[in-house]
């Protein structure tokens, strides 16, 4: 009887861990989706600013190679 109880407990704990992992995966997928969306929205001006900054750096510090 104790063995059956322990196996049921193990099964419930496994189900719990499985649910937790699924929730975690969905959270991470949502996070990555929002992150890629945010970067897609925010990145273009950042890239433009970075390219202008690199051009200014090239003008101020000319590359040797």
Image (cartoon, helix red, strand yellow):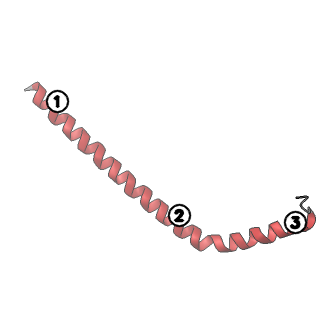
Near-viewer residue (63 or 48): 63
N-terminal of the two: label 1 or label 3? Answer: 1
* Quarter occupied by the N terminus: top left
Q: Residue at x 64, y 70 (%)?
A: 43
Any mark on residue 60, and which? none
Horizontal arrangement in the rendering, residue 25 relative to residue 48 (left or right) = left
Q: Dot 1 surroundings within 10 Å: few (below 14), some, or many (20 or more)?
A: few
- Is label 3 in a helix, a strand or a loop? helix
Taking the view exactly as shown, the residue that stands out farthest to the left is 1
Residue occupying image coordinates x 24% and y 44%: 15
Snapshot quadrant of residue 49: bottom right
Q: Which residue is drawn at the image coordinates 41% and 57% (left, top)?
A: 27
Real-space Cα separation, disc 1 to disc 2, in angstroms: 42 Å
1 shown above or below 13: above
Lateral position of residue 15 relative to residue 58, left or right: left
| Location of residue 42 in the rendering, given as x and y in whole percent from the top left corner | 62, 71
Mark 1 or mark 2: name the one nearer the start of the chain: 1
Residue topped by disc 1: 6
* Residue density around tag 2, few if under 14, some if 14–19, many if 20 or more, within 10 Å: few
The mark that comes first in sequence, 2 or 3, is 2
């Amino acid at each position: 009887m104790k063995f059956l109880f322990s196996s049921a407990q193990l099964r419930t704990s496994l189900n719990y861990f499985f649910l937790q992992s699924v929730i975690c995966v969905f959270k991470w997928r949502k996070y990555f989706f929002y992150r890629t969306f945010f970067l897609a929205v925010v990145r273009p001006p950042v890239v433009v600013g970075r390219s202008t900054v690199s051009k200014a750096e090239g003008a101020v510090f000319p590359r040797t190679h």
